[in-house]
């Protein structure tokens, strides 16, 4: 179990948002925190703490007028600590290698391989031919509907027809190096972690997986350790002191 830090970028700023409110309409999201610091400042801080494997997420769509600003921030962060951070947001087979050239250790992909609500294995194979399995993280962030988890795409706005279950994790685990999974129903709320989802991730843990969503206190992290059987990595967003929350980075690093 490892702590994986994050740098979420929206409208050209490092932010923490309530995940379920993100929409492309007017590039809106309900905000928990907006930083005046650059993304590269956070990258250097994570480097100082030795926190590899963090993810940089571009939250605007590629057609957004803010996307270039997001990308500039991300490029600075990746350059500040090369081969240590992962990046997601608008990644395709055509541009994946360019993110590795910027300094990313991995690219994080969802929408490109879940096109039209279905898994596009042809696109998955194209990604692998361009960058290799060792540089690919699949983001299987999900929302619950009708008592089942479904993978969501396009910055968590669109449901796919693909349930997130053990079969999917076993199948896709052969295509990538890691999974990143946001529990979108609780993402950014600080109301507690999704215990059912954590149990699923622990049961099917064959490659590294990072869980995100709902952490608001230290007890939530202990819950991840207990239910996740010490197998599930975690990230803390809005609840972290770096983003205005109550949880201290140094305490998390010391304890977990």
Image: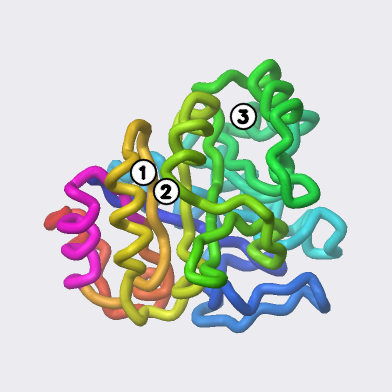
Distance of label 3 from label 2 (alpha carbons): 18 Å
Could you tell me which residue is drawn at 32 percent across and 76 percent down?
Answer: 192
Q: Is residue 225 magenta?
A: yes
Which quadrant holds residue 59? bottom right
Pointer 1: residues within 10 angstroms few (<14), some, or many (20+)?
some
Q: Mark 2 points at which residue?
A: 44
Looking at the image, do the residues carrying marks 2 and 1 touch, with CB atoms under 8 Å apart?
yes
Residue in the image at 26% along x and 73% along y: 247
- Identify which residue, 213 or 42, lies in the foreground: 213
In the rendering, at what x and y percent does residue 25 appear? 82, 76
- Which portion, as a residue range, is magenta? 218-234
Classify 193 as above or below 106. Answer: below
Rendering coords of residue 196 (x, y %): 33, 63
- Residue under pointer 1: 47
Nearer the observer: mark 1 or 3; the answer is 3
Q: Position of residue 168 (x, y in %)?
A: 51, 40
Query: Residue 100 — which label?
Result: 3
Residue 73 vs 20, above or below: the answer is above
User: Would residue 92 appear left or right of 40 to someone viewing this image?
Assistant: right
| Residue 69 among magenta residues | no
Q: Give the secondary structure at mark 2.
A: helix
Q: Are marks 3 and 2 in contact (CB under 8 Å)?
A: no
Q: Is residue 49 visible?
A: no
The circle drawn on residue 72 is none
Residue located at (50% from left, 63% from top)? 148
Secondary structure at numbered mark 3: helix
Query: Which callout, 1 or 3, points at the residue further toward the start of the chain?
Result: 1
Q: Which of 43 and 205 is in front in this view?
A: 205
Residue 233 is at least partly visible in this image = yes
């Amino acid at each position: 179990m490892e702590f994986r830090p994050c740098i979420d970028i929206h409208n050209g700023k490092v932010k923490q948002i309530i995940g379920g409110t993100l929409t492309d309409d007017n590039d809106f999201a309900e905000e928990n925190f907006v930083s005046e610091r650059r993304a590269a400042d956070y990258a250097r801080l994570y480097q100082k703490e030795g926190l590899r494997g963090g993810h940089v997420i571009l939250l605007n769509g590629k057609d957004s007028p803010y996307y270039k600003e997001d990308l500039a921030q991300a490029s600075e962060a990746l350059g500040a600590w090369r081969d240590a951070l992962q990046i997601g947001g608008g990644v395709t087979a055509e541009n994946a290698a360019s993110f590795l050239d910027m300094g990313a250790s991995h690219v994080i992909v969802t929408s490109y391989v879940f096109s039209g609500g279905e898994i596009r294995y042809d696109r998955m194979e194209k990604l692998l031919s361009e960058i290799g399995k060792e540089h690919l993280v699949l983001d299987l962030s999900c929302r619950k509907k009708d008592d089942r988890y479904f993978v969501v795409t396009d910055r968590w706005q669109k449901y796919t027809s693909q349930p997130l279950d053990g079969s999917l994790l076993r199948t896709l685990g052969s295509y990538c190096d890691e999974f990143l999974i946001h529990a979108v129903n609780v993402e950014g709320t600080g109301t507690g972690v999704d215990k059912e989802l954590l149990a699923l991730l622990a049961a099917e843990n064959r490659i590294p997986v990072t869980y995100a969503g709902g952490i608001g206190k230290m007890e939530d992290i202990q819950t991840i350790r207990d239910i996740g059987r010490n197998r599930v990595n975690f990230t803390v967003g809005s609840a972290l002191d770096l983003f205005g929350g109550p949880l201290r980075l140094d305490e998390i690093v010391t304890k977990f």
